[in-house]
Image: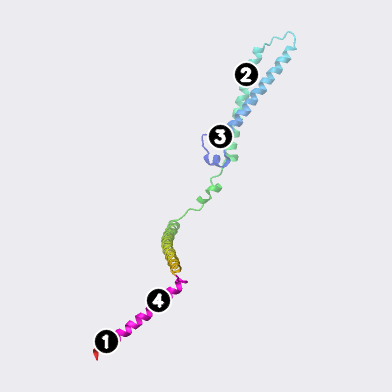
Amino acid sequence: MSVNPMTYEAQFFGFMPQTCMLRIYTTFQDYLFEVMQAIEQVILKKLDGIPHCDISPVQIRKCTEKFLCFMKGHFDNLFSKMEQLFLHLILCIPSSILLPEDKCKETPYSEEDFQQLQKEIEQLQEKYKTELCTKQALLAELEEQKIVQAKLKQTLTSFDELQNVGRDHGTSDFRESLVSMVQNSRKLQNIRDSVEKESKRLKIS
């Protein structure tokens, strides 16, 4: 049997070529033993039909074993040649052939290719960091919007409460009252400004 592990062939075929040949050898050898036993049984039956035969079964067995050794020797010699034929011409993958999963090794990468790949990896990492920062900024802005929305909701609730208080005290529309109050406040502020200007003018004169 061959001592070459033939791992690449085992990867392709799914079995070790030497294991395959061993099974073939064992099958042929078992078949040879069965044939010799059948021949021995036939000879013994023929001898039983011959009267006054001096050949005993023990002699037949010795002859059978001797012939079996002779056949086994020739068979081992022929099988050794057949094994070399199978392992070198049939179950062998040439060194120039690559399996599909090893096609990437067919074209080696240069130092420039490696540098280019390294540069692309760095660019992708920077892009990922930028997108991560953008995501964090958006999440922070979303939190701020939630806070503003909560405050706005609270303000609207306060206006609704004030409007309800105004209704309880006879004011029909709180918003209109608020607008009117603001306008009156502005008028009063304008009057105050006019009075202050007139007072300053009189003091100067």
Q: Quadrant of the N terminus?
A: top right
Say which residue appears at 63% left-offset and 28% top-offset: 28
Mark 2 touches mark 1? (CB < 8 Å): no
Any magenta on residue 175?
yes
Magenta residues, start to end: 170-197
Q: Amino acid at mark 1?
A: Lys
Discs 4/3, front: 4
Residue hosting label 1: 200
Residue 199 figure quarter: bottom left
For marks 1 and 3, give the CA distance: 119 Å
Q: Amino acid at mark 2?
A: Glu
Q: Residues within 10 Å of mark 2 (few under 14, many from 20)?
A: some
The mark found on residue 65 in the picture is: 2
Say which residue appears at 53% left-offset and 50% top-offset: 103
Looking at the image, is 99 positioned above or below residue 138?
above
Any magenta on residue 172?
yes
Q: Amino acid at mark 3?
A: Gln
Residue hosting label 3: 18
Please provide percent x and percent y for residue 4.
Answer: 51, 36
Q: Secondary structure at mark 2?
A: helix
